[in-house]
Amino acid sequence: MKLIASLTSPYARKVRIVLAEKKIDCPLEEDIPWNAGSRISHYNPLGKVPVLVLDDGSTLYDSRVIVEYLDNISPVSRILPQDNRLLIATRRWEALADGILDAAVAIVMENRRPADKQMPESIAWQMTKIRRGLAVLSNDLADRQWCNGSAYSLADVAVGCCLAYLDFRFADIAWRENHINLASLLDRLATRPSFADTVPPAQ
């Protein structure tokens, strides 16, 4: 089994954190999809990371599928709640966090286009999604320590990866000042070895 990923991908970081939390040894093969010579489309027809290559050569994608698979192959540090109500709540947290990331990545890619080809209205629309999403995350977290209440779960991993990516790529958003409870959550998560060991390299 091996993980194909970019070290700066927040979706791949989610998988890497789950691997660490569950103490699953899995080699990492770095592949940046937009680089010349990328082979990621050989594993995922959508040309996206992460991809988990299983021992029989079959592949799993995207991050949501991979983390569910990883949680099921090892009983160590279950990251998905067994209670159905909490499981659905966790999946909702993950969906919103990933949706914010989708909008953030869309802005990053738009900003890489030549200046005269960029669409400011598209960037503004994606930024609106980010700000609305953060407001809902903050409101739903309220004063709880963890997203689902008393227990650390995939919800926290997904939200943590989302917030850390905003710090990484969008320092000017100043989301921490507007959502102190989310900032506190990320600060707690940052002390976990799984988060500390997967910080993306400086750009």
Image: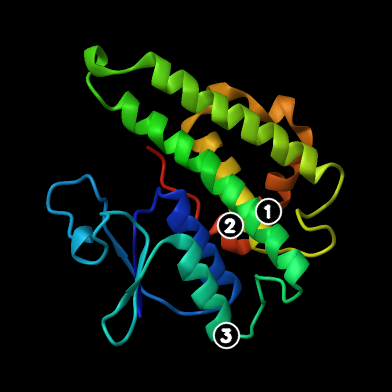
Residue at position x 78%, y 58% in the image = 148
Residue at position x 82%, y 52% in the image = 145
| Rendered-image quadrant of the C terminus | top left
Residue 163, percent from left and from top: 60, 41
User: Which secondary structure lies at badge 1?
Assistant: helix
Mark 1 or 3: in front is: 3
Mark drawn on residue 56:
none
Residue 185, percent from left and from top: 73, 46
Alpha-carbon span between mark 1 and mark 3: 22 Å
Residue, disc 3: 74
Q: Is residue 139 left or right of residue 198?
A: right
Q: Is residue 112 left or right of residue 18?
A: left
Amino acid type, label 3: Ser
Is there CB contact under 8 Å for labels 1 and 2?
Answer: yes
Residue at position x 66%, y 57% in the image = 155
N-term-proximal mark, 1 vs 3 = 3
Callout 3: few (<14), some (14-19), or many (20+) C-alpha neighbours within 10 Å?
Answer: few
Q: In this view, does 111 lie to the left or right of 199?
A: left
| Rendered-image quadrant of the N terminus | bottom left
Q: Is residue 102 left or right of residue 203?
A: right
Amino acid type, label 1: Leu
Q: Which of 183 and 57 is in front in this view?
A: 57
Residue, disc 1: 189
User: Which secondary structure lies at badge 2?
Assistant: helix
User: Which secondary structure lies at badge 3?
Assistant: loop
Which colouring convention does the figure follow? rainbow
Amino acid type, label 2: Phe
Residue 70, percent from left and from top: 51, 76
Mark drawn on residue 195:
2
N-term-proximal mark, 1 vs 2 = 1
Is there CB contact under 8 Å for labels 3 and 2?
Answer: no
Q: Nearer the viewer, residue 17 or 103?
A: 103
